[in-house]
Image (cartoon, rainbow, N blue to C red):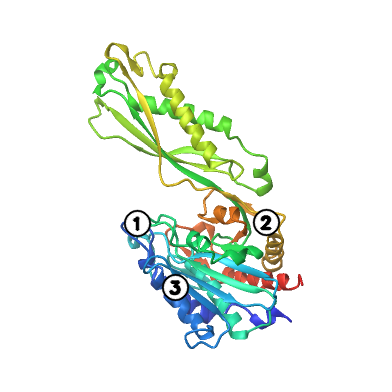
Amino acid sequence: MDLKQILGDLNRESFITLLSKLIGESKFVQNNPPELTPEEDRVGNHVLDVLQPYSTSNGGGGPLIINHVSYVKGRGNIIVEYPGSDDKGKILSFVGCHMDVVTANPDDWDFDPFSLSIDGDKLCGRGTTDCLGHVALVTELMRRLGETKPKLQSTVVAVFIANEENSTIPGIGVDALVKDGLLNKLKQGPLYWIDTADKQPCVGTGGMISWTIKATGKLFHSGLAHKAINPMELLMESLKEIQLRFYRDFPPHPKEQLYGFATPSTMKPTQWSYPGGGVNQIPAECTISGDVRLTPFYDINDVTKKLHEYVDDINANIEKLDSRGPVSKYILPDENLRGKLTLSFGEAPMSGVACNLDSRGFHVLCNATKEVVGHVKPYSITGSLPLIRELQDEGFDVQTAGYGLMATYHAKNEYCLFSDMCQGFQVFVSIISQLENDG
């Protein structure tokens, strides 16, 4: 059986018709709570409309088994199954197509982000690269399977998800589906998480810890600096010391080169704030916030523990910290005052993932990519993808790929290329074909 001939190429008219509807919903699936909470069912309903004629229920002609699972009203997940004939449970899955988007300000864009515009090969709009383009792509794959009904040994499953990233309500997407056992059988074969970019296997992602350090000093007139504890100087010197210790304890890991990470683990500030006041006033406090991006060869919990140790040690020995100038100090003995650091963390830390480079799922993805794209060059980034580490820890063979453009990922004027999506479709077909030939 020549599956490639049966399924053919990505149908431009069908794909763009669906994608146009999905991008038309992007305004309502922006994810930035509490101001903007996505209503993923607005996207999911279009997916269901396309696949319903091939469903085994609600008057469809089969063979697709469709399960619409909701834990929160308006924020459902869709599991679509094309059954295979293998009684041993041979299976592969395409997961990770989340039905929300990041925010977009139309005033900053050169075109309307909330409607699809087409410029030759370019398909423009919020969500074309991340991740509504993938939703449309995988929907088209399942539609073609339902339409052509090829005789496969393998069961092919697609899962479209409500995104838990940024959510104020836990347990609405993949984690809930796993907890309820609805994805358990996907452990029997490779799980392809379709949520990255640039058509190459992404074999590693970073963990992320958001942190805030507040320095408390003593407010005073800047002309009498000897009577103040300057929290800005305290925090600048402390952060330098904390970063030095971090890079000593979490240096570049030997496996980072094997996985192709562009950067090692990093800890850096990204935001600075203070209560305000005149330029002639040393403030009483200030705050720096930032993040840690951690390659998956280190444990997130070890880092948070170490950060607490760094801060506790600096507080206990604050008189030993470098100061700035002859009257800069962090202790006022006559007033029994000491400067102080307070460390806190933001949302729950997220662990990175290192995909299994020895798995059949990885080799199949590489072969398909080389066949279709012409070359294969797996890469890793210290950007973070939610949930996939947890899936890996649960026993899933998680591999990641995507067919949007990294250059427009979460960016203004987002777009993808139809030609890239066509290659993504061909990669999916090649993956299915290879696993069929495993016997």
280 lies left or right of 8: left
Q: State the image coordinates of residue 132 (x, y, percent, origin top left).
A: 47, 68
Residue nearest the viewer, comparing 40 with 108: 40
Q: Nearer the viewer, mark 1 or mark 2?
A: 1
Q: State the image coordinates of residue 349 (x, y, percent, origin top left).
A: 47, 45
Q: Residue furthest top?
A: 334
For badge 1, the amino acid type reads Pro
Q: Secondary structure at mark 3?
A: helix
Q: Secondary structure at mark 2?
A: loop
Residue contact at pointers 1 and 2, CB within 8 angstroms = no
Whole-Å distance between the Cαs marked 1 and 3? 20 Å
Q: Residue at x 62, y 85 (%)?
A: 148
Q: Residues within 10 Å of mark 3 (few under 14, many from 20)?
A: many
The mark found on residue 377 in the picture is 2
Whole-Å distance between the Cαs marked 3 and 2? 33 Å
Q: State the image coordinates of residue 356 (x, y, percent, origin top left).
A: 67, 54
Position of residue 323 relative to residue 303, above or below, is above
Q: State the image coordinates of residue 295 (x, y, percent, origin top left).
A: 58, 44
Q: Secondary structure at mark 1?
A: loop
Q: Residue at x 41, y 19 (%)?
A: 318
Quadrant of residue 414 within the rendered picture: bottom left
Question: Circle 3 sits on which residue?
Answer: 44
Quadrant of residue 22 within the rendered picture: bottom left
Question: Circle 1 sits on which residue?
Answer: 33
| Sequence-wise first label, 1 or 3 | 1
Q: Residues within 10 Å of mark 2 (few under 14, many from 20)?
A: few
Quadrant of residue 81 within the rendered picture: bottom right
